[in-house]
Amino acid sequence: MAGSANKTPAVLVIGRSTINGVVVSRIVERAGLKARTAPPELAAHALETDLPSIVILDLPADDPAGGALFERLAAQRAAHARALPAVIVLSATTDPAQAPNGAAVVDIVVARPITVDRLQPAIEAVRARNGDYS
């Protein structure tokens, strides 16, 4: 998104549930951002082609696709001066002991149930910390 002041920032929502993807996308759009959803199997391609500023992961901690996604996110963040994309994880708990393997690349964990009151402040927090992406 660098150098494109008129483009809407991109958020990639990765998860297995279509319904949760729609709910999260609506919250993202309410925050004034453009959302795209992808299942974990297509997430690697979406990360490369879309270059999102924020990634929201809606996967259980034991999901087999999680490890590869966290590795790819870590590589992308290491290559970017502002450590983008920012990563928000949707989880059943915010307990650090139950964090997924890639917890080092996670910026914020949001506990379920996912509501506007929980997710939108997290989105605004990563935008404030890392810039407005516009």
Image (tube, grey):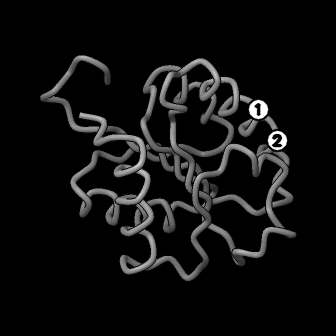
| Horizontal and vertical percent position of residue 87 | 57, 48
How many numbered circles are shown?
2
* Residue 67 to residue 5: above or below: below
| Label 2 close to label 1 by CB (< 8 Å) | yes
Residue extending furthest toward the left = 6
* Residue 25 to residue 34: above or below: below
What is the spatial separation of the Cα atoms under label 2 and label 1, in whole angstroms? 6 Å
| Horizontal and vertical percent position of residue 91 | 67, 70
Q: Which residue is drawn at the image coordinates 61% and 76% (left, top)?
A: 111
Q: Is residue 35 left or right of residue 100?
A: left
Residue 26 placement: quadrant: bottom left
Q: Quadrant of the C terminus?
A: top left
Kindly state the secondary structure of the residue where label 1 is placed. helix
Residue of label 2: 67
What's the residue type where badge 2 is placed? Gly
Residue 72 placement: quadrant: top right
What's the residue type where badge 1 is placed? Glu
Q: Quadrant of the N terminus?
A: top left
Q: Is residue 12 left or right of residue 70?
A: left
Q: Is residue 80 left or right of residue 52?
A: right
Q: Which residue is drawn at the image coordinates 43% and 63% (left, top)?
A: 24
Residue of label 1: 71
Q: Nearer the viewer, residue 63 or 6?
A: 6
| Horizontal and vertical percent position of residue 62 | 86, 59
Q: Which residue is drawn at the image coordinates 58% and 25% (left, top)?
A: 45
Q: Is residue 3 left or right of residue 99?
A: left
Kindly state the secondary structure of the residue where label 2 is placed. helix
